[in-house]
Image (tube, helix red, strand yellow):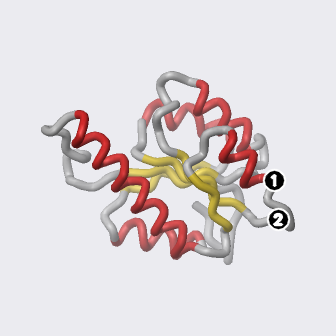
Amino acid sequence: MQETVRNAAASAGHRVTAVAKGAQAFDLAVGVQPDIIVLDLSFPDADGRDILAKLKADATTMLIPVLVWSSGRTNDSDSRISLALGAEDYVQKDDARLLIRKIERVLLRVEESERARNPSWLPHSDGHASFIAWATRAVAGFHF
């Protein structure tokens, strides 16, 4: 699944930066300032909801859109909590194509918003947006 997402993102020209531990997530977001963050809620050393809350509370990261991509549970409490904490959307891990569509939609909205505020705004120098995908475990043997 993650391989599919990574390949689809790369073929669309996106740069993907990944971390495996929650402790790295916030610092990387501050340093990289990605166009979008794809955040897993399950880290071996942190709760992704705490990371999301920290991202949305900090002035340097609060405007970065966050898509939560996590394992589905039988109830939708993770989805509701993620949206309440400021996530753009919540996508189940079993639907990589939906995740890519949502990433593209959010990036398009960000680009349109930036162009409306600043008509001379351009995406990154190579013309492609970047995003951070954070995951914690291997899915089908692939590690981010």
Question: In the displayed structure, does residue 41 sit left or right of residue 66?
Answer: right
The C terminus lies in quadrant: bottom right
User: Which quadrant of the structure image shows residue 114?
Assistant: top left
The type of residue carrying mark 2 is Arg
Q: Which mark is residue 77?
A: 1
Question: In the displayed structure, does residue 129 sit left or right of residue 25?
Answer: left
x and y, in percent, of residue 136 in the image: 69, 55
Q: Residue at x 42, y 36 (%)?
A: 33
Q: Which mark is residue 73?
A: 2
| Outermost front residue | 116
x and y, in percent, of residue 34 in the image: 42, 43
| Outermost top residue | 59
Residue 27, can we see it?
Answer: yes
The type of residue carrying mark 1 is Ser
Q: Mark 2: which secondary structure? A: loop
State which mark lies toward you, 1 or 2.
1
Residue 18, can we see it?
Answer: no
Mark 2 surroundings within 10 Å by alpha-carbon count, few (fewer than 14), some (14 through 19), many (20 or more): few
x and y, in percent, of residue 55 in the image: 59, 33
Question: In the displayed structure, does residue 138 sit left or right of residue 87?
Answer: right
How far apart are the two marked residues, 1 and 2, measured between alpha carbons? 8 Å
Image: 8 above or below 131: below
The N terminus lies in quadrant: bottom right
Q: Residue at x 60, y 45 (%)?
A: 87
31 vs 82, nearest the viewer: 82
